[in-house]
Amino acid sequence: MSVVPQPKIIVFSTPTCSFCNAAKRYFREKKIKFRDVDVSRDQRAAADMQRRTGQTGVPVILINNRPIVGFDKPKINKLLGIK
């Protein structure tokens, strides 16, 4: 049986963003590891997020370096292979 490797997930967020918190809660419920990057406290991360995606709003979720803007559950599930 082959084990599917855990995808690399980064969530660019702020503490006050309700969609960010919903996305992080969703990953926790699914027991999916992710790295949370608070762009309100990390200006370099905010600049990196903007450079990668052209976005200044959060959340921006990177799944194996593929950006998803906003908490787009269908797109997240598609990239993670979740039904």
Image (tube, helix red, strand yellow):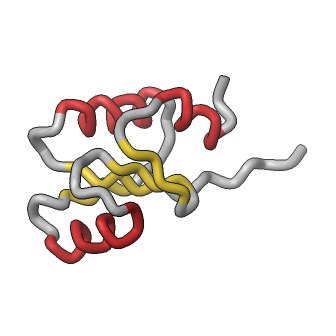
Question: Which quadrant is home to the C terminus?
Answer: top right
Q: Could you tell me residue 9's position as x and y percent?
A: 48, 54
Taking the view exactly as shown, the residue that stands out farthest to the front is 54
Q: Please tell me in which quadrant of the rendered image residue 18 appears.
A: top left
Left or right: 16, with 48 as reference point: left
Q: Residue at x 53, y 63 (%)?
A: 65
Between 11 and 2, the one lying in front of the other is: 11
Q: Could you tell me residue 8's position as x and y percent?
A: 53, 58
Between 10 and 6, the one lying in front of the other is: 10
The vertical placement of 42 against 6, above or below, is below
Q: Residue at x 30, y 57 (%)?
A: 55
Q: Residue at x 26, y 39 (%)?
A: 20
Q: Residue at x 25, y 47 (%)?
A: 58
Taking the view exactly as shown, the residue that stands out farthest to the bottom is 44
Question: Which quadrant is home to the N terminus?
Answer: top right
Taking the view exactly as shown, the residue that stands out farthest to the right is 1
